[in-house]
Image: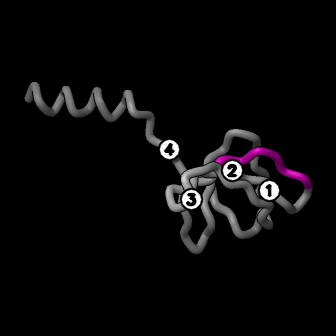
Amino acid sequence: MAFAPGDIVQLKSGSPALTVISETGETVEVVWYSDEVGEFRTNSLPAITLEALEVVDFEEDEDEEEEDDEA
């Protein structure tokens, strides 16, 4: 599976959301914020270990809540 910079992914076995920085062949470089150490971390991972995440836009969530409140 090909990933592009800016894609949001996670490990197939579970992990925090990771942002793709770059992809070179079968390796994907990712970045994420680690609450444990209070800083951004990066790592290169095999592409086969990652899956794309669907990120819901916060504005859509707010619109849905407003509609629910009006009902």
- All told, the count of numbered labels is 4
- Tell which residue pokes out farthest to the left in this image: 71
Cβ–Cβ under 8 Å for marks 1 and 3? no
Residue 61, image x, y percentages: 32, 35
Tell me the residue that label 2 is attached to.
31
Q: Nearer the viewer, mark 4 or mark 2?
A: 2
Q: Nearer the viewer, mark 1 or mark 3?
A: 3
Residue 47, by quadrant, is bottom right
How many residues crowd around disc 1 within 10 Å: few (fewer than 14), some, or many (20 or more)?
Answer: many
Q: Earlier in the sequence, mark 4 or mark 2?
A: 2
Was residue 22 drawn as part of the magenta stretch in this picture?
A: yes
Tell me the residue that label 1 is attached to.
28
Tell me the residue that label 3 is attached to.
37
Q: Secondary structure at mark 3?
A: loop
In the picture, measured across the screen, residue 54 lies left or right of residue 52, that is left
Residue 52, by quadrant, is bottom right
Give the amino acid type for the residue marked by disc 4 in the picture.
Answer: Val
Range of magenta residues: 19-24
